[in-house]
Image (cartoon, helix red, strand yellow):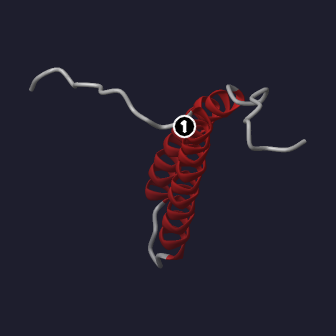
Amino acid sequence: MGMPVITASSTIRDQAITDLIQSVALEETALSHILNAEGEKIQKIVALPDVTPEVLLATNKSVESMVNSISNLEVILTDKISLFKECKCNNIEE
């Protein structure tokens, strides 16, 4: 695999900022879907008729790990979006 080639873009600054903010919104949506799936996993395990405490603990550990990972990603996304807190785009009126 060779080195990636980055070519110059004709995208204007305002559009680049908008694209980055949209990417954060899409990542947030994806994370919400993952959290929802983890909740559904817990509901299915708890609803099993002969679920053991060991299975419940293992499920809890798995979900806890995923939630911790998502929390770490949320910090990164917060930092990413804070880069544009003071940004003044040309076509936005205050």
Compared with 85, 94 (above or below) is below
Farthest-out residue, left: 1
Determine the residue positioned at 77% across, 31% down. 88
Compared with 14, 52 (above or below) is below
Q: Is residue 63 left or right of residue 85?
A: left
Determine the residue positioned at 57% across, 56% down. 29
Q: Nearer the viewer, residue 36 or 27?
A: 27
**Residue 69, x across and y down, in percent:** 52, 37
The residue to which callout 1 is attached is 16
Q: Is residue 94 left or right of residue 88?
A: right
Q: Is residue 13 left or right of residue 78?
A: left
**Residue 94, x across and y down, in percent:** 90, 42
Determine the residue positioned at 50% across, 63% down. 37
Q: Nearer the viewer, residue 6 or 25?
A: 6
Quadrant position of the N terminus in the picture: top left
**Residue 93, x across and y down, in percent:** 85, 44
Compared with 80, 44 (above or below) is below
Farthest-out residue, right: 94
Secondary structure under the numbered disc 1 in the rendered image? helix
Would you identify the image quadrant in which residue 70 lies? top right
Amino acid type, residue under disc 1 in the picture: Ala
